[in-house]
Amino acid sequence: MITVTIKKNKNEIKQIEMKGHALYDTLGKDIVCAGVSSILTTTVNAILRFNENYIRFHEAKTFVLDVLVWDDVVEKLLINMIDLLKELSISYPENIKIREEEI
């Protein structure tokens, strides 16, 4: 299962963590993993086009995205990403879970 953890402080997203594997299908054929990867990559690339200093990210076993600047652009793009991931989790509840935490 892919677990997405959204860490917020007073309605501002501070960090997003993604870890795990969907296990919907075999490697290279997993539509849930492909969907999550596409959503994440599109969002990160869009934010970086506005300003490379808005976010920082790294990936090891867990993908971690730190939000460095919270403005209207970042807010809209990240909320859109979360909405898309939530829609995916409704269709595939055994393969992706979204959690929100207040920090």
Image (cartoon, rainbow, N blue to C red):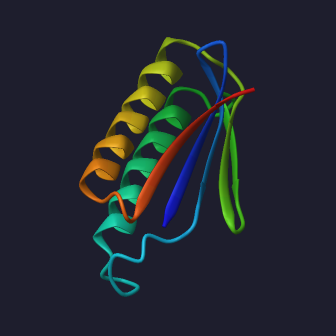
Q: Residue 33 vs residue 10: left or right?
A: left
Could you say which is closer to the camera, residue 54 or residue 31? 31
The relative height of residue 80 versus residue 86 in the rendered view (above or below) is above
Residue at the (35%, 34%) spot, across then down: 83
Q: Quadrant of residue 101?
A: top right
Q: Residue 90 vs residue 50: left or right?
A: left
Q: Tell me residue 103's x, y (percent).
A: 75, 26
The relative height of residue 77 versus residue 24 in the rendered view (above or below) is above
Residue at the (50%, 62%) spot, across then down: 2
* Numbered label tally: 0
Q: Tell me residue 69's x, y (percent).
A: 67, 20
Q: Quadrant of residue 76?
A: top left
Q: Residue 33 vs residue 66: left or right?
A: left
Q: Quadrant of residue 91?
A: bottom left
Q: Tell me residue 42's x, y (percent).
A: 40, 46
Q: Residue 89 vs residue 3: left or right?
A: left
